[in-house]
Amino acid sequence: MIVATGLTRVFGSRAVVDHVTFDVRRSEIVALLGPNGAGKTTTMRMLAGLVAPTSGSVAIDGVALTRGTGSALRARIGFLTEAPGLWDRLTVRENLRTYANIYSLANPERVIDRALDTFGIRDRAATRTAELSKGTRQKVALARALLHEPAILLLDEPTSGLDPEVTRSVRQLLEDRRSAGCAILVSTHNLDEAERLADRVAVLDGRLLALDRPAVLRQRLRTGRVIVRVAGEPAAALAVARGFDPKASVELGSVVLALPHAERDTPGLVRALVAAGAEVVEVRAEIPALEDVYLHLVGDAGAKAS
Amino acid sequence: MTRGRLRALFRKELLDVARNPAALLPVFIIALVALVLPFVIALLLPAMTGQHLGDDRDLLRVSMAAGAHGDLSADALVQYFLFQQFLMVFLLMPITGAMALAAHAIIGEKQARTLEPLLATPVTTAELLVAKVLGALAPTLAISAAGALLYFVAIGMLADPGVLRAMMTLRTWILLGFIAPAVALVSLQAALVVSSRVNDARTAQQFGALVIVPLTILLVAQFSGTLWLSSATLALAGVGLIAVWVLLMLASVSLFDREAILTRWK
């Protein structure tokens, strides 16, 4: 488990990361979202002990990450950096072997073979990494990060440059690692990926704007729009709805209206619809997509900052 | 410092150099020149022109000043002098060759963006820097040693009798086997300090060159006889150089700013 408390990093006069507190628990995937320059990479680097926080602290399994403990604690972390960072003149196997030996893995060749098989790149083992495609380089970098089966995974854009099939297999792999008890922090711009994969989502824009389960975050952004689906023609239902919202309309066969106090007003709406003879099939509050929530949060933060 | 991690990094450095022969090209060229030129000057030209080296009184006087070898003929004495002068090239070879590799060591990793994943492992700064130094030193030292061996074999086969024996002194061995690698080590470490503080390889090489100039002058002075130190003094100087290397290593570790390298270098 990794805990960041009041993490702050100032470069010059600018606080790139500003009092960020969160944790990633065992068997959990947390997605770190944020626009470019939001401090995601700096946060990752501070968690990996590569950059020292100006203030605040990082603890791994209860041990504070310091200069003295850094080397030992980094052995528990698998870090996928923004760029694959492979030694171009070395082959895939030689790259992985160097890291396997750095981590003092027992039977490194077997571990490497397993990693190569996991990513389907065994046939490229003897290829120099300079000759690999972007996607394959990313696979090798991922294999390197997972080589020592770390308890904590910090992954900066893990599926960047991968085709959909491989992306799916990487997601499956991360889910498997989560099942195995791994604490995983994934930085991504892919909101769909965050929603599919993450147990919790952290939205960062210098400060931590939100940290919660995707479903809870979506609930937070209430649009106040209510969608009513009725059997047959919606004209009668629309007339009733306009009594609640003069701008009510029909979209894709359903009546859509705005109810600023949906909790209070929806029962009255349903009663009025039934009284007017409408055969109500479904009445639901519109749930925004994670993308809407993200844009709302980041937009709000930007507006406040300016 | 963990031996396993050090070995892993050292192997990686060797593989990287082996796959990039162009990096060692200057060393090979120097070795070739050092192996061919002295024989052309000392043996081939006199044979082609029919003139004896020992007939040149000025050259003979200079040769005699470089060391007293009463049992050598005049020709052999001049040959000894010339071969001794060119031996200096083999001393400078590990320094100049390894400098090019070391100057590029940290900057190259940073530019290829391979440093960040490496620094995210348990590798310590000392392990990284020692591996870099040894990885740069070993190949150039091996080439220099092989070159020097060929040089001596060729002298034994081609030069006048007694020349090789005259060159085979304890002092030569101390200079070749101890002082030269120690000077190379100090120069390398200095280059590495510079490499981890500046952000382009040329600047590192230029700063590194500043460090090796005084050391090179000392070496040249030794062989030319300008500054004549006894074998014992040289051995002591070698120990001193190793101590300087250890101090420089400690300085390198404390000056190596992981964070600045990752965040400020572009």
Image: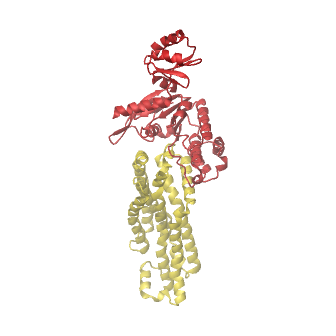
In the image shown, does B251 or A272 lie closer to the viewer?
A272
Q: Is residue A212 above or below residue A55?
A: above
Residue found farthest to the left: A13
Q: Taking B7 as reference, is A208 left or right?
A: left
Q: Position of residue A106 (x, y in %)?
A: 63, 42
Q: Position of residue A143 (x, y in %)?
A: 59, 42
Q: Position of residue B42 (x, y in %)?
A: 51, 82
In the image shown, does A68 or B69 lie closer to the viewer?
A68
- Looking at the image, can residue A3 be seen? no
What is the quadrant of residue B240 in the picture? bottom left
Say which quadrant the C terminus of chain A sits in.
Answer: top left
Chain seen in red:
A
Chain seen in yellow:
B
Type of colouring: by chain
Q: Position of residue B78 (x, y in %)?
A: 48, 82
Residue at image position (48%, 75%) is B86
- Looking at the image, can residue B37 be seen? yes
Q: How many marks?
A: 0
Q: Is residue A28 above or below residue B256?
A: above
